[in-house]
Image: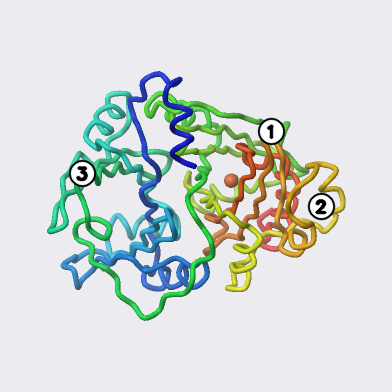
Amino acid sequence: MEESLQDQATPTQKEDFLPINGTDYIELYVGNSKQAAHFYKTAFGFQSVAFAGLQTGLKDRESYVVVQDKIRLVLTTPLKGGTEMGAHIDRHGDGVKVVALWVDDATKSFEETVKRGAKPYLEPTTESDDHGKVVKSGIHTYGDTVHIFVERKDYKGVFLPGYERWETNYNPSETGLRYVDHMVGNVDWGEMNKWADFYANVMGFTQLISFDDKDISTDYTALMSKVMSNGNGRIKFPINEPAEGKKKSQIEEYIDFYEGSGVQHIAVATDNIIETVTALRDRGIEFLRVPGTYYETLLDRVGEIDEDLEPLRDLGILVDRDDEGYLLQIFTKPIEPRPTLFFEIIQRKGAKSFGKGNFKALFESIEREQQLRGTL
Ligand code: FE2
């Protein structure tokens, strides 16, 4: 499917100065990478792939790499005090540090973005081992988040040079998660346009759709959002900023608890959302719930769908339709103590949008959670 998207898009695009093959990996800085890896395996069905730490010669950190189909997570914890990683965890809690992008030329990716105004994070660097070489480079984006460009065409190893295969007797089954559909950034008050412009001007992305606080608001929650996409459509970054509501919006709550801009949610695609969400629920993942009344009028809003209503209602799966089809989606509760990062599970049946029709019902659900947290 990804290939066909590119075939359709390429001939009509003007020359893409930053061709991206897909998301390479997402690295989270966490308080305890060993236990976090266990959680992602147990609860989400990720598979053990690679490891780097004291045993592989690292002195300052320990990283675990877990994979499910095309989704690759790296979980990293510092091994001593006074590190940049430790400061990141102290300020933000567990969260996404790196959104790594798979490119054919990491040096050109760095040069093209830096000359357009990107702040350098990592100069082009070649790493190699017995399995070949990888070129990495990196630039800063919103908050303390960075993009690393990974060029791995000359590499055959398990992940990156320096990592060893992670052998384990504990290999829980997958849950049907397939690839990263989109990743959403929450940025600080008044910064949405700045970061939409960054993705447009510095990275050559285009804006897909936008809505403002008149479209999406409840009594309390309001936000503005723009969706930025790269040339072949494989990378989609919606950017949210808080808008004034009667009380604290969930975007504002995120900014307060993350202490700045950062990744709000990682949306992962499945081919069968009912099976996937059933498995995740059975493994202890908690989801936001909308009121049962949502389902009474669902088919009036979205028309015919292939799925039976009953399992959707039972699991709390939401449905939205646009001009091209429909989508099914559900959002987890935050996966760490701070109300910050969460996951979305999404199944697309033609629709290319992001579930705008569900936002109001969702926000009302999130506000009930905020009420319980005393942060509304
Ligand atoms: Fe989303």
Residue behind mark 1: 213
Q: Residue at x 79, y 45 (%)?
A: 304
List x then y, in percent, for residue 317.
Answer: 70, 56
Left or right: 245 as drawn, with respect to 14: right
Left or right: 129 as drawn, with respect to 304: left
Residue behind mark 2: 294
CB of mark 1 near ligand 1 (< 8 Å): no
Nearer the observer: mark 3 or 1; the answer is: 3
Identify which amino acid the numbered label 1 is placed on.
Asp
CB of mark 2 near ligand 1 (< 8 Å): no
Q: Is residue 198 above or below residue 262?
A: above
Q: Is residue 364 above or below residue 107?
A: below
Foreground of the two, 328 or 236: 328
Q: Residue at x 23, y 66 (%)?
A: 164
Q: Quadrant of residue 278?
A: bottom right
Residue behind mark 3: 135
Marked residue nearer the N-terminal end (3 or 2):
3
Q: Which mark is residue 105?
A: none
